[in-house]
Structures are given as C-alpha cells and as structure tokens.
Image: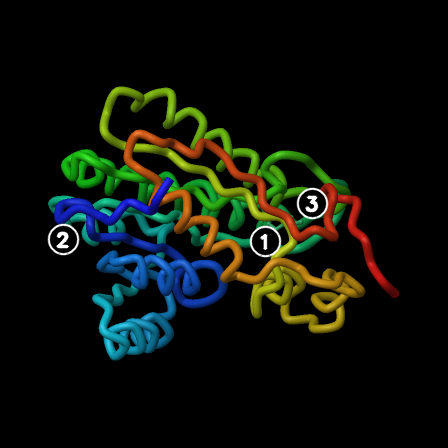
Amino acid sequence: MTAAAPSAASRIAVVTGASSGIGAATARRLAAAGYRVVLTARRKDRIEALAEELTAAGHSATAYALDVTDRAAVDEFATAFRTIGVLVNNAGGALGADPVATGDPEDWRRMYETNVLGTLNVTQALLPALTASGDGTVVVVSSTAGHGTYEGGGGYVAAKHAEHVLAETLRLEIVGTPVRVVEIAPGMVRTEEFALTRFGGDTAKAAKVYEGVAEPLTADDVADTITWAVTRPSHVNVDLMVVRPRAQASNTKVHREL
Ligand code: 8X3
C-alpha cells in the first residue's frame, strides 16, 4: 500500500501540543508529507519558530497560540476553517507518579482537563470541518497508559483510559461519515519534556524513567507512526496502534542494562 497524497480539501492538518516532542515531530513529518500544517500550543514563541523553520524549508506552516482547555478560544480558532483533513490531538501529559492513596487531586484534575477535555474540545470544534473535507482523520495520541495500569500511574492512567474511550466511542458514533478515528498509543518515548514535566522539573527522577533502556522511542518514531496511519488510503482506518520500544514488553516489564 502506498502513501495517499492529501487532496486539496483535506490538505490542512492541525496539530495540538506542537511546541515540542511528539507534536513538533508530527508537524514536521506531516509537512514533509504535503500537508499545510497548523501548529497549536500555548507557547507561541516555540510554534512560531517551528512554523518559520518549516516555511523556510519550503513547507506550508502557520502557528496559532491555543490552550486546548479553553473552550471559547478553541471555538474561536475553529471558525478559521471551512474544511480540514487531519486533526492530531497530541496536547496532554502527565503530572506526578504518586499512589492513589496520596496523589494530588489538583494533578488529577489538570490531567483530565488537558488530556481528555482538551481532546474533546478540539475534536468537537473541528468535526464539522473534518466532515466537510469529505476525507477527514482524527488522531488521538493516547498512551499505553490508556490500555493498562501501573503503580503510581494513577491520574495519568485514568485520564488516558478516558481518552481511549473517547476515541472508541467517537468511532462508533460517526461511522458512515467520511471521518476516520485513529488512536496511537505510545509506550516509553524519551522526549525533552514528558518525564521532566511529570516530576516537576526533577531531572534525576526524570532520568530514572529511561535508565538503562537501550533505545526508548523518540518523538520522531511516534510521528512516523502517526504519519503512516494518516497517509493510508481513505478507506483504511487504523483503529489503534500500540507502539513501544523493543526493550519494553509491557507498562511494567522493561529491560534495563544497568
Ligand atoms: C507515556 C507512557 O509509561 O509513562 O504515555 O505512562 S507511560
């Protein structure tokens, strides 16, 4: 099967959380695949720099500062589009790794808001434009944390399970419309920020996550997977892909060379 080139009506790809990590890498890959990428994230300076980099390389890219948890701002953003081809719901992340018994409810709330309600907000707002393209794809970047739990996973595992269920339910509800729902569930990915954010900037704790693991996935590995799924012919719906490094057999079974 060869990669499908985007049609004129489905050439725009919106990527949330495009300021770093998987989001930025996905924007690069989709731009290279011929999409006009719209980069969104809270950090305007970062997405503007990436849009400039992509434009200088001959691609089409624009930056739009957006907090996916701000529904009014998301609705305003959506008014800019009559049709779009791809929405990559990537914004989200983990806060804390505390047991359920002592986890901070504020962390749980923020994780639910960014991962779940953020995905809900942007998907709801852009679904009419995705449908209008006649060939839309919604990508939900969930996590292996959405498919199994682990000690200390707590609020992140709960939020990612909810995000997975959102994707599954939406796929059932919109079958028959020209929109696919693709869930990509990455396992251990070493990005510059994921673990650091989770541990409140504690570099030692963040480094421990990847300690002794030969080759955790990179953001680009996941971006490659997302782009592959998006560029399948329109009738092919990759429902769910779980992507882990070879050294990780499950959420709790990781080979470390220490
Ligand atoms: C990242 C995977 O194992 O940190 O979404 O939950 S994990």
How far apart are labels 1 and 2 at the CA level? Answer: 30 Å
Residue 216: percent from the left, percent from the top? 66, 60
Residue visible at 69% across and 45% down in the picture = 153
Residue bearing the label numbered 1: 94
Q: Is residue 93 shown above or below 63?
A: above
How far apart are labels 1 and 3 at the CA level? Answer: 9 Å
Residue visible at 69% across and 62% down in the picture = 215
Residue 112: percent from the left, percent from the top? 51, 43
Does residue 94 appear in the picture of this structure? yes
Residue visible at 23% across and 25% down in the picture = 177
Residue bearing the label numbered 3: 153
Q: Is residue 35 shown above or below 83?
A: below
Q: Secondary structure at mark 1?
A: loop
How many other residues sit within 10 Å of disc 1, few (<14), some (14-19) or many (≥20)? Answer: many
Residue bearing the label numbered 2: 80
Mark 2 CB within 8 Å of ligand 1? no
Mark 3 CB within 8 Å of ligand 1? yes
Residue placed most toward the observer, 209 or 78:
209
Q: Secondary structure at mark 2?
A: loop
Residue placed most toward the observer, 8 or 46:
8
How many other residues sit within 10 Å of disc 2, few (<14), some (14-19) or many (≥20)? Answer: few
Say which label, 2 or 3, has the lower sequence index: 2
Pointer 1 and pointer 2: residues touching (CB < 8 Å)? no
Q: Residue furthest right?
A: 258
Instruction: Say which quadrant the C terminus sits in.
Output: bottom right
The answer to whether 204 appears left or right of 238 in the picture is right
Q: Secondary structure at mark 3?
A: loop
Amino acid type at mark 2 = Ala
Residue 126: percent from the left, percent from the top? 24, 42
